[in-house]
Image (cartoon, rainbow, N blue to C red):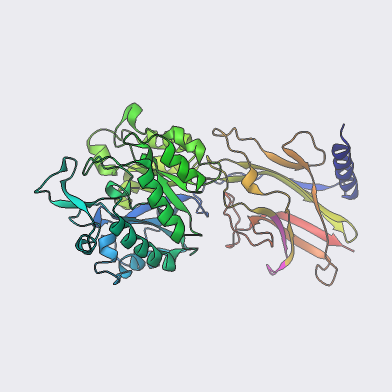
Amino acid sequence: MSAKLAIAILASVALFAQTPAERVVVYPKDAGTALVNPGMGWQFHHYDNNIRNYGVNLDPSDTVDEFPGLSSIYLRLAWSYIEPEEGKFNWSIVDTPAARWIAKGKQVAFRFTCSEGTPYATPEWVRKAGAKGNLINPGRGVAPDGRMWEVDFDDPVFLDKLDHFLAAAAARYDGNPEVAFIDVGSFGTWGEGHTYSASLLPYSAATIRRHIDLYKKNFKHTLLVANDDFVSQGRGLEAIDYARRMGLGLRDDSILVQGGERAYLHALLAPLFWTTVPVILESEHYGSSKNKGAWGDGSLYLQAIEEYHASYATVHWYPREFLAECRPLIDKINLRLGYRLQLLEASWPAEIHRDQTLAAGYQWRNAGVAPCLPGGYPAITLKDAKSGIAGVFVDEELDVRNLPVGPPGKAATVTREAKTTSQESRPFTAWSLPPATILKPGTYTVWISVGSRMGTPKIALPLDNEDGQRRYRLGEIRVVD
């Protein structure tokens, strides 16, 4: 036995000996609720392909509050809508819908595109300034009489104008806690990192690196996200590996654009990302997928979430129609999407004397597919009869980010208990009580939460008896002199 292990066991035994014989032990049950938490959840497209899809049919007061697990909205819009004239910006087109959901505690995510279903996704003034490009017919390539203009994604005039646009966007959104992430969406059709549905022209990994570098130059704080199709058109892993090394997250668009074994194609990329940054999955336009028979029962969307270890899932359709027709699937996904911190067991002394330490034990499990990337620390809060906070005790040695993930119901647990039996088990955590002037003798309710080192709750748990501030009632404790 190592000296460190011996000391740990002796310390935990000593703590256990200090506590009264009677301990309260509870086994909370997962309430099955959909959780809205930082860095994860459902989002739906407010703008997509054009300014008509899909949220513009909602009244200004309508934020689809009944959609379980909805944490953010996605605004995918051509650059030309935002900067129709050089240096003159129409930010209201995105800030207006964003404000509705932000007022409900949600976030927004952006993709500003340079090739969309519009004649000029890159503003026409960029072409007039000297940027090179081609007239195209979507999906059929370059055509002298093409109905759309696609910029040369390597053109220096274009890249200079794009740099100025991104600088303006970063001045508004970089580091803004209301923004979940921003896609590197300036390259390829719909910002997806390919030209299959437009000019068909090939571009090298060097092109994608240039675009990533422009985003990294301007967005120094907000999470940036790379598209899985950076590997397409013969580029291999070079561009996507560069994205990984630059700290970008991963996005895979149009899950179930095809059915069966081709429902998704790039799950093998996910291990490069999901352990440290979020993975976002976007379904194919639900109605289109359903009409051509690719959607089936939707179970392949859940399978993709499992294989990619996804933190976000996107509704690529009218949200209420999707909810009405896919509610069982949504409920299943909500039990796995992102992280789901389950408190399986908790214990504490029924009565504690002033000169004793408060020794708490518990067992945690992450029942989601992804790590709790925002991290957080368990806290015990004691409340008096008037619901006033009388004591806060934070376990700073247990960061829930480190809880492992696994198949449904099989993730390893991390336990605080009286003795260390494995690498996943730790001794009781123990805190000295504050003076009697702060924590007076009496009976207090015991609450559990996960959040900051100061004990501020940040993460919703799937438990009943919540106080409205992400603390959850477990039982009672008596403090005596």
Residue 90 at least partly seen: yes
State yes or no: residue 446 in magenta. Answer: no
Image coordinates of residue 228 in percent, x first then y, are 39, 40
Residue 353, placed above or below residue 406:
below
Side of 180 relative to 355 (left or right): left
Residue 181 at least partly seen: no
Q: Quadrant of residue 304?
A: top left
Image coordinates of residue 251 in percent, x first then y, are 41, 44
Residue at x 8% of width, y 49% of height: 145
Residue at x 86% of width, y 40% of height: 4
Q: Quadrant of the N terminus?
A: top right
Give the mark count: 0
Q: Nearer the viewer, residue 120 or 373?
A: 120
Q: Nearer the viewer, residue 308 or 245?
A: 245
Q: Nearer the viewer, residue 368 or 125?
A: 125
Side of 42 relative to 457 (left or right): left
Residue at x 41% of width, y 41% of height: 239
Image coordinates of residue 131 in percent, x first then y, are 24, 57
State yes or no: residue 382 in magenta. Answer: yes
Residue at x 62% of width, y 59% of height: 457
Q: Quadrant of residue 458?
A: bottom right
Q: Quadrant of the C terminus?
A: bottom right
Q: Nearer the viewer, residue 225 or 431?
A: 225
Q: Quadrant of residue 291?
A: top left
Side of 125 relative to 439 (left or right): left
In the image, farthest residue toward the top: 261
- Residue range in magenta is 379-389
